[in-house]
Amino acid sequence: MKNKFRKKEKQTVETKSSKTKVKSVGTRKKSVTVLWVVLISSLAFGIYKNFTAIDQHTVHEKEVIETKLVDTSAIESFTKNFVKDYYTWQNNKESIERREEKLSLYLTKELHALNTDTVRADIPTSSSVSDIDIWSVSQEDDGTYAVVYTVKQNITEDKNSEKHSSTYRILLHQDSVGNLIITQNPTLWNTPNKSDYEPEQSESDGTVDTNMVQEVTEFLETFFTFYPTATDKELAYYVKNNALPVVGKNYSFSELLNPIFQQSENQVHVWLSVKYLDETTKTTQVSQYALTLEKDTNWMIVGTIDVQVR
């Protein structure tokens, strides 16, 4: 029995020793737990951002400058009335006193006092206003406007009379209800003169061949012959897009002057002057046009040229 027990014990020991020992790495190990926490947190954060995200758009700010139209008709009328009264007098005491009374309707008290005796009671001249030109009305400040004007006077002394012209600038104030008062006395100013600006002239650039030039010229001569008296329906055969208006004038066509031709793809641009005889006034009238033409079954005027093609 003893030997049998030992043999069994030996077999048991051999069986146990034959099993391979496995070192398990479970999900409860700290490093793995941390990785799972990070993964779950990232997923949760992504879902949260997806639902709570705010769309971001690039905002392009555009500055809009609004042009405010100011009705200056009241300012111009007020100025013209003032100019007429300021520069009109007779060489007698009564006329000069009436002038001073009228000026009180336009000037501040300070300016009215300043203008006392500008036209003396013993003045040898008389003055009347023949014309008034308003050159500009500009807003200087809130409610304050500058007006530049030219006054043309007939100055009489004894039996002699001469024309006189001067340009001045005044300041006016307009209150919230539209009332006006002059706050600066007529001050000598410069008169606008003729500018030396000369626009660039278009020139034929050789893009239109001789045959096309002749063809377009014949079309234009035909068109401008009947154009002054043409109706809407008649214009529709020659003009598209309301490029030229109905004029309804008693003009007789004379000739085309200095036509200039340029071609751009299927269009021909033409700059020209058209000479007419005005049957009413018996004078010559010269109109200038810058036209764009296209040819379908026949030539058509399809537009006018705002920016010159060169």
Image (cartoon, helix red, strand yellow):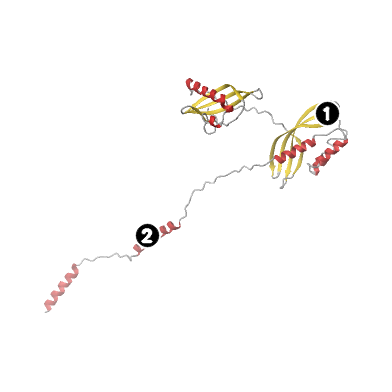
Q: Which numbered disc covers residue 39?
A: 2
**Residue labelled with disc 1:** 156
Q: Where does residue 244 sit, x and y in percent of width and height?
A: 56, 31
Numbered disc 1: secondary structure: strand
Specify the label residue 305 is tagged with: none
Q: Amino acid at mark 2?
A: Leu
Within 10 Å of the Cα at label 2, are there few (<14), some (14-19), or many (20+) other Cα atoms?
A: few
SS at mark 2 in the image: helix
- Can residue 75 be seen here? The reply is yes
The residue under label 1 is which amino acid type? Answer: Thr
The residue lying at 19 percent from left, 69 percent from top is 17
The numbered mark, 1 or 2, whose residue comes first in the sequence reads 2
In the depicted structure, whether residue 134 falls above or below residue 32: above
The one nearer the camera, 111 or 309, is: 309
What x and y, as percent, mark residue 39? 37, 60
Q: Nearer the viewer, residue 283 or 235?
A: 235
Q: Looking at the image, which residue is at 56% across and 30% down? A: 231
Work out whether residue 296 or residue 163 is closer to the camera in this orientation and state it. Answer: 296
